Image (cartoon, grey):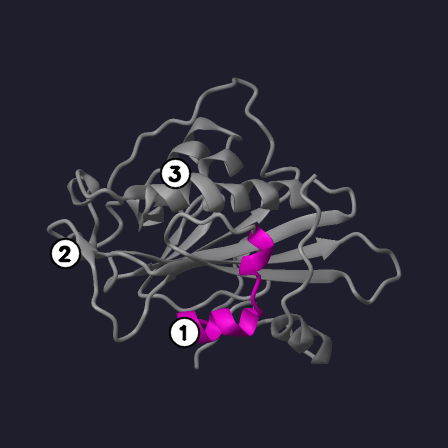
Amino acid sequence: MIEIPSLRPESRYGIPTADLFLFNRLYIVGYSYLFRQPRWAMQVIDDETMMQADEDFDRLDNFREDMRVPENFRSTLDDYRGSGFDRGHLINSADRKGSRIVNSETFLLSNMSPQKPGFNRAIWLELEEAVRKLAKKKEIAEVYTICGPLFKIGDKIEVIGDNHVVVPDAYFKSILAEKIKPKSTNQLAMWSFEIPNKRTNKSLREFLVPTEQIECRAGLQIWDKLRGEKSDRLKTRKGRMWSVK
Protein backbone atom coordinates (compact mmCIF):
# COMPACT_ATOMS: atom_id res chain seq x y z
CA MET A 1 0.00 0.00 0.00
CA ILE A 2 1.30 3.45 -0.93
CA GLU A 3 1.28 5.80 2.02
CA ILE A 4 -0.28 9.18 1.31
CA PRO A 5 1.79 12.02 2.78
CA SER A 6 0.17 14.33 5.32
CA LEU A 7 0.46 17.63 3.50
CA ARG A 8 -2.44 19.28 5.30
CA PRO A 9 -3.28 19.77 9.02
CA GLU A 10 -6.50 17.78 8.57
CA SER A 11 -4.55 14.67 7.59
CA ARG A 12 -2.03 14.80 10.44
CA TYR A 13 -3.28 11.49 11.84
CA GLY A 14 -3.88 9.83 8.49
CA ILE A 15 -5.93 10.12 5.31
CA PRO A 16 -7.98 7.25 3.83
CA THR A 17 -7.99 6.23 0.19
CA ALA A 18 -10.44 7.62 -2.37
CA ASP A 19 -11.03 7.86 -6.12
CA LEU A 20 -10.42 11.61 -6.03
CA PHE A 21 -8.98 13.92 -3.39
CA LEU A 22 -10.58 17.38 -3.25
CA PHE A 23 -8.60 19.88 -1.19
CA ASN A 24 -10.66 22.84 -0.05
CA ARG A 25 -9.49 25.72 2.10
CA LEU A 26 -10.50 24.19 5.44
CA TYR A 27 -11.52 20.62 4.69
CA ILE A 28 -10.66 17.63 2.50
CA VAL A 29 -13.03 15.31 0.66
CA GLY A 30 -12.27 11.80 -0.54
CA TYR A 31 -14.73 11.42 -3.41
CA SER A 32 -16.33 8.20 -4.66
CA TYR A 33 -16.95 7.89 -8.40
CA LEU A 34 -19.20 4.86 -7.81
CA PHE A 35 -21.48 6.46 -5.22
CA ARG A 36 -21.44 10.00 -6.80
CA GLN A 37 -20.74 11.57 -3.41
CA PRO A 38 -18.00 11.81 -0.78
CA ARG A 39 -16.67 8.57 0.57
CA TRP A 40 -15.43 10.64 3.48
CA ALA A 41 -14.72 14.25 4.50
CA MET A 42 -12.30 15.47 7.16
CA GLN A 43 -11.57 18.70 8.97
CA VAL A 44 -9.90 20.30 11.99
CA ILE A 45 -12.01 22.29 14.44
CA ASP A 46 -10.19 24.72 16.74
CA ASP A 47 -10.35 28.37 17.80
CA GLU A 48 -9.01 29.56 14.46
CA THR A 49 -11.32 27.53 12.21
CA MET A 50 -14.38 28.41 14.33
CA MET A 51 -13.58 32.11 14.14
CA GLN A 52 -16.47 34.23 12.90
CA ALA A 53 -16.00 36.66 10.02
CA ASP A 54 -15.76 40.35 10.88
CA GLU A 55 -18.72 40.86 8.57
CA ASP A 56 -21.53 38.69 9.86
CA PHE A 57 -23.53 36.81 7.23
CA ASP A 58 -26.09 34.04 7.02
CA ARG A 59 -25.14 30.68 5.52
CA LEU A 60 -24.83 31.21 1.79
CA ASP A 61 -26.91 28.26 0.54
CA ASN A 62 -25.22 28.46 -2.87
CA PHE A 63 -25.45 24.74 -3.64
CA ARG A 64 -23.64 23.92 -6.88
CA GLU A 65 -21.81 21.23 -8.80
CA ASP A 66 -18.12 20.71 -8.17
CA MET A 67 -16.46 21.16 -11.55
CA ARG A 68 -13.34 19.35 -10.34
CA VAL A 69 -15.27 16.06 -10.41
CA PRO A 70 -15.43 14.43 -13.88
CA GLU A 71 -18.88 15.11 -15.33
CA ASN A 72 -19.89 11.45 -15.68
CA PHE A 73 -19.22 10.88 -11.96
CA ARG A 74 -20.70 14.15 -10.71
CA SER A 75 -23.95 14.73 -8.81
CA THR A 76 -26.17 17.65 -9.82
CA LEU A 77 -28.90 19.78 -8.30
CA ASP A 78 -31.44 17.97 -10.48
CA ASP A 79 -30.51 14.65 -8.86
CA TYR A 80 -31.75 15.93 -5.50
CA ARG A 81 -34.72 17.97 -6.76
CA GLY A 82 -37.99 16.25 -5.83
CA SER A 83 -36.14 13.20 -4.45
CA GLY A 84 -37.40 13.57 -0.88
CA PHE A 85 -33.78 13.66 0.34
CA ASP A 86 -31.81 16.62 1.70
CA ARG A 87 -28.51 17.70 0.23
CA GLY A 88 -26.83 16.70 3.48
CA HIS A 89 -23.54 18.37 4.39
CA LEU A 90 -20.68 16.19 5.57
CA ILE A 91 -18.65 19.26 6.57
CA ASN A 92 -21.33 21.59 7.88
CA SER A 93 -21.48 25.28 7.06
CA ALA A 94 -21.80 26.33 10.72
CA ASP A 95 -18.22 25.15 11.31
CA ARG A 96 -16.96 27.35 8.48
CA LYS A 97 -17.99 30.99 9.06
CA GLY A 98 -14.55 32.61 8.85
CA SER A 99 -15.21 34.10 5.41
CA ARG A 100 -17.73 33.95 2.60
CA ILE A 101 -15.51 31.81 0.39
CA VAL A 102 -14.82 29.33 3.19
CA ASN A 103 -18.55 29.05 3.91
CA SER A 104 -19.34 28.85 0.20
CA GLU A 105 -17.06 25.85 -0.28
CA THR A 106 -19.21 23.77 2.08
CA PHE A 107 -22.08 24.02 -0.43
CA LEU A 108 -20.25 22.19 -3.21
CA LEU A 109 -22.18 19.04 -4.10
CA SER A 110 -18.96 17.08 -3.63
CA ASN A 111 -19.62 17.70 0.10
CA MET A 112 -23.23 16.47 -0.10
CA SER A 113 -24.90 13.10 0.44
CA PRO A 114 -28.60 12.11 0.22
CA GLN A 115 -29.88 12.35 3.78
CA LYS A 116 -33.42 11.84 4.97
CA PRO A 117 -34.78 15.10 6.43
CA GLY A 118 -35.57 13.43 9.77
CA PHE A 119 -31.90 12.46 10.06
CA ASN A 120 -30.19 15.54 8.62
CA ARG A 121 -32.20 18.09 10.58
CA ALA A 122 -32.18 16.20 13.87
CA ILE A 123 -29.62 13.65 15.10
CA TRP A 124 -26.94 14.61 12.52
CA LEU A 125 -27.34 18.30 13.39
CA GLU A 126 -27.22 17.40 17.08
CA LEU A 127 -23.92 15.57 16.58
CA GLU A 128 -22.43 18.52 14.67
CA GLU A 129 -23.38 20.87 17.52
CA ALA A 130 -22.01 18.45 20.12
CA VAL A 131 -18.63 18.32 18.35
CA ARG A 132 -18.43 22.14 18.33
CA LYS A 133 -19.09 22.14 22.08
CA LEU A 134 -16.32 19.59 22.53
CA ALA A 135 -13.89 21.75 20.56
CA LYS A 136 -14.70 24.77 22.76
CA LYS A 137 -13.85 22.99 26.02
CA LYS A 138 -10.84 24.54 27.77
CA GLU A 139 -9.08 21.17 28.14
CA ILE A 140 -9.24 20.51 24.37
CA ALA A 141 -6.59 21.94 22.04
CA GLU A 142 -8.18 20.91 18.75
CA VAL A 143 -10.54 18.34 17.29
CA TYR A 144 -10.15 16.27 14.13
CA THR A 145 -13.22 14.74 12.50
CA ILE A 146 -13.84 12.37 9.63
CA CYS A 147 -17.31 11.37 8.50
CA GLY A 148 -18.97 9.67 5.58
CA PRO A 149 -21.75 7.42 4.27
CA LEU A 150 -22.18 3.72 4.97
CA PHE A 151 -23.85 1.20 2.67
CA LYS A 152 -25.33 -2.25 3.29
CA ILE A 153 -23.56 -4.66 1.01
CA GLY A 154 -26.00 -7.11 -0.60
CA ASP A 155 -29.16 -5.08 0.04
CA LYS A 156 -31.19 -3.50 -2.73
CA ILE A 157 -29.62 -0.18 -3.71
CA GLU A 158 -31.70 2.99 -3.75
CA VAL A 159 -30.55 5.79 -6.03
CA ILE A 160 -31.75 9.30 -6.85
CA GLY A 161 -31.56 11.30 -10.07
CA ASP A 162 -30.31 10.58 -13.55
CA ASN A 163 -26.77 10.25 -12.20
CA HIS A 164 -27.84 7.47 -9.82
CA VAL A 165 -26.54 9.00 -6.60
CA VAL A 166 -26.60 6.11 -4.12
CA VAL A 167 -28.62 6.59 -0.92
CA PRO A 168 -26.62 5.56 2.17
CA ASP A 169 -28.03 3.22 4.79
CA ALA A 170 -26.19 5.07 7.58
CA TYR A 171 -23.44 7.58 8.33
CA PHE A 172 -20.36 7.55 10.50
CA LYS A 173 -18.42 10.26 12.25
CA SER A 174 -15.14 9.65 14.07
CA ILE A 175 -13.69 12.30 16.36
CA LEU A 176 -10.10 12.54 17.55
CA ALA A 177 -9.39 15.19 20.19
CA GLU A 178 -6.04 16.50 21.38
CA LYS A 179 -6.13 17.35 25.07
CA ILE A 180 -4.17 20.07 26.82
CA LYS A 181 -2.51 18.02 29.56
CA PRO A 182 1.08 19.04 30.29
CA LYS A 183 3.38 16.15 31.18
CA SER A 184 0.65 13.62 30.36
CA THR A 185 1.16 10.70 28.01
CA ASN A 186 -2.59 10.31 27.45
CA GLN A 187 -3.34 13.36 25.35
CA LEU A 188 -5.71 11.85 22.81
CA ALA A 189 -9.36 10.85 23.03
CA MET A 190 -11.44 9.15 20.34
CA TRP A 191 -15.15 8.65 19.76
CA SER A 192 -16.94 7.12 16.77
CA PHE A 193 -20.63 7.09 15.87
CA GLU A 194 -22.66 4.97 13.45
CA ILE A 195 -26.15 6.40 12.88
CA PRO A 196 -28.86 5.05 10.51
CA ASN A 197 -30.07 7.43 7.82
CA LYS A 198 -33.53 7.93 9.35
CA ARG A 199 -35.34 9.75 12.11
CA THR A 200 -34.58 8.46 15.60
CA ASN A 201 -35.57 9.23 19.17
CA LYS A 202 -32.43 7.66 20.59
CA SER A 203 -29.66 9.70 22.19
CA LEU A 204 -26.24 10.19 20.61
CA ARG A 205 -24.69 7.97 23.28
CA GLU A 206 -26.58 4.98 21.93
CA PHE A 207 -24.79 5.29 18.59
CA LEU A 208 -21.24 5.15 19.98
CA VAL A 209 -19.27 2.24 18.49
CA PRO A 210 -15.59 1.19 18.42
CA THR A 211 -13.68 2.91 15.63
CA GLU A 212 -12.52 -0.46 14.31
CA GLN A 213 -16.19 -1.29 13.64
CA ILE A 214 -16.45 1.81 11.44
CA GLU A 215 -13.30 0.79 9.59
CA CYS A 216 -14.72 -2.65 8.81
CA ARG A 217 -18.10 -1.30 7.74
CA ALA A 218 -16.72 1.56 5.61
CA GLY A 219 -13.72 -0.31 4.24
CA LEU A 220 -11.46 2.55 5.29
CA GLN A 221 -8.43 2.93 7.53
CA ILE A 222 -9.13 5.77 9.95
CA TRP A 223 -6.45 7.62 11.92
CA ASP A 224 -3.96 5.13 10.49
CA LYS A 225 -0.90 7.20 11.44
CA LEU A 226 -1.51 6.53 15.12
CA ARG A 227 0.99 3.95 16.33
CA GLY A 228 1.43 1.82 19.42
CA GLU A 229 -0.57 -0.15 21.96
CA LYS A 230 -2.34 2.88 23.44
CA SER A 231 -3.49 3.97 19.98
CA ASP A 232 -4.80 0.48 19.26
CA ARG A 233 -6.84 0.58 22.47
CA LEU A 234 -8.46 3.85 21.37
CA LYS A 235 -9.88 2.10 18.30
CA THR A 236 -11.23 -0.93 20.12
CA ARG A 237 -13.39 0.80 22.72
CA LYS A 238 -16.48 2.97 22.47
CA GLY A 239 -15.39 5.72 24.82
CA ARG A 240 -17.72 7.67 27.09
CA MET A 241 -19.68 10.54 25.58
CA TRP A 242 -18.43 13.98 26.58
CA SER A 243 -20.74 16.44 28.33
CA VAL A 244 -22.64 18.64 25.86
CA LYS A 245 -23.85 21.14 28.48
Mark 1 vs 3, N-terminal side: 3
**In the drawing, does residue 138 fall left or right of residue 57?**
right
Q: Is residue 66 magenta?
A: no
The quarter holding residue 159 reads bottom left
The residue identified by callout 3 is 105
169 or 220: nearer the viewer: 169
Q: Residue at x 62, y 75 (%)?
A: 236
Position of the C terminus, as image quadrant, is top right
C-alpha span from label 1 to label 2: 24 Å
Estimate the x, y position of residue 51 in percent, counting from the top left.
Answer: 60, 31
Q: Say above or below: 236 vs 191.
A: below
Marks 2 and 3 close (CB-CB < 8 Å) = no
The disc at residue 219 is 1
Spot the residue most to the front: 201
Which residues fall within the magenta stretch?
204-220
Q: The disc labelled 2 sits on which kind of residue? A: Asn
Spot the residue most to the left: 162
**In the drawing, does residue 95 fall left or right of residue 104?**
right
Position of the N terminus, as image quadrant, is bottom left
C-alpha span from label 2 to label 3: 21 Å
The residue identified by callout 2 is 72
Estimate the x, y position of residue 92 in percent, counting from the top left.
Answer: 45, 41
2 or 147: nearer the viewer: 147
Mark 3: secondary structure: helix
Residue 221 visible within the image: no
Estimate the x, y position of residue 63 in percent, counting from the top left.
Answer: 29, 35
Estimate the x, y position of residue 139 in percent, counting from the top left.
Answer: 78, 47
Q: Tell me the crowding category of disc 1: few under 14, some 14 to 19, or many 20 or more residues within 10 angstroms, Cα based.
A: few
Mark 2: secondary structure: helix
Q: Is residue 209 magenta?
A: yes
